[in-house]
């Protein structure tokens, strides 16, 4: 089921009546619905928040964004940045943005963020952010940090359409390391999340809950990796020469 599907919460609640346990992505159910349902059957969320009655599995947003921010601020020396967030209430987007803001403040760099920089985790959202800002005559920062790779794809596309070079004029980064990130004409610097391991871990945690085994933690954090590619200003890891 898609997160944008109409009445997804209602369908999830109907499915729960036939299930022994559920693995749910962030934002599928409202907090109140999730709390009530988790008191009836075991629930593991992905990229959400752990609660007294649920477990949560997610990548290490803090260490990933910290490594990415320091690479941009210290290795490349970018002094103006922006953060294109996902959904305003997304735990992942919020945490990544907070870490970036902290690192920018410590480095004395300027960071733009907020409602006008909301990309909603989709490529079209990232493209719309850039197009609206340029239409308003706004100057862009030296680096644009995106909450996920899909937003970054849209940002890079819009910059290309407006004749703005990446990374020469504006550096762009993502988060997730989707397969396409490596194969773009300008490969995408990003944070690699262990997507398959997240699913496997969520299943193992749910099985433990069903078996009534004690959980060492209700908040399971998996390691992530900074992947340096062209879009931040690093050399092309594929060894190509750009014309």
Image (spheres, rainbow, N blue to C red):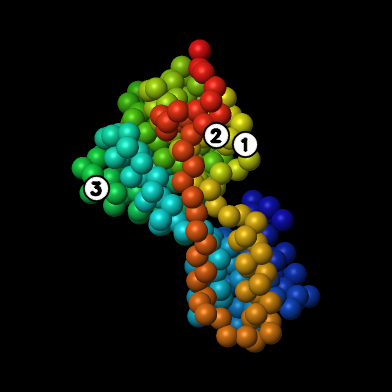
Please provide percent x and percent y for residue 51: 50, 75
- The residue indicated by pointer 2 is 153
- Looking at the rendered structure, the secondary structure element under dot 1 is helix
Query: Which residue corresponds to mark 1?
Result: 180
Which residue ends up furthest to the left in the rendered image?
A: 108
Residue 207 coordinates in the image, percent (x, y):
68, 77
**Quarter occupied by the N terminus:** bottom right
Report whether 80 appears left or right of 144.
left
Secondary structure beneath dot 2 equals helix
In the image: residue 83, left or right of residue 43: left
Q: Residue 105, labelled with which disc?
A: 3
Please state the horizontal and vertical placement of residue 211, each as a whole percent of the image.
69, 85
Among the two numbered marks 3 and 1 on one chain, the one whose residue lies closer to the N terminus:
3
Q: Earlier in the sequence, mark 3 or mark 2?
A: 3
Confirm whether residue 135 shows in the render: no
Structural distance between the alpha carbons of marks 3 and 1: 32 Å
Rendered view: 48 above or below 74: below
Front residue of 213/4: it is: 213
How crowded pointer 3 is (Cα within 10 Å; few <14, some 14-19, many 20+) is rated as few
- Give the quadrant of residue 118: top left
Q: CA distance from mark 2 to mark 1?
A: 9 Å
Which residue occupies 40% across, 45% down? 68
Q: Which mark is residue 113?
A: none
* Residue at the (58%, 55%) spot, across then down: 194
Whether the residues at callouts 2 and 1 have beta carbons within 8 Å, the answer is yes
């Amino acid at each position: 089921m898609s997160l944008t599907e109409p009445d997804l919460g209602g369908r999830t609640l109907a499915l729960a009546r036939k299930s022994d346990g559920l693995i749910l992505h962030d934002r599928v159910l409202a907090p109140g619905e999730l709390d009530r349902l988790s008191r009836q059957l075991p629930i593991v969320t992905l990229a959400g928040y752990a609660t007294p009655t649920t477990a949560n599995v997610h990548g290490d947003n803090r260490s990933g964004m910290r490594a990415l921010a320091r690479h941009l601020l210290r290795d490349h020396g970018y002094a103006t940045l922006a953060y294109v967030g996902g959904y305003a209430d997304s735990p992942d987007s919020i945490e990544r943005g907070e870490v970036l803001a902290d690192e920018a403040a410590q480095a004395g760099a300027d960071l733009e963020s907020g409602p006008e920089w909301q990309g909603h985790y989709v490529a079209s959202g990232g493209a719309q952010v850039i197009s609206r800002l340029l239409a308003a005559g706004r100057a862009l920062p030296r680096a644009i940090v995106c909450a996920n790779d899909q937003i970054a794809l849209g940002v890079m596309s819009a910059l290309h359409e407006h004749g703005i070079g990446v990374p020469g004029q504006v550096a762009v980064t993502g988060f997730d390391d989707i397969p396409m990130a490596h194969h773009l004409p300008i490969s995408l610097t990003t944070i690699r999340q262990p997507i398959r391991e997240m699913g496997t871990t969520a299943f193992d945690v749910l099985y433990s809950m069903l078996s009534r085994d004690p959980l060492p933690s209700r908040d399971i954090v998996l390691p992530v990796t900074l992947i340096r590619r062209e879009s931040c200003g690093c050399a092309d890891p594929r060894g190509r020469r750009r014309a």
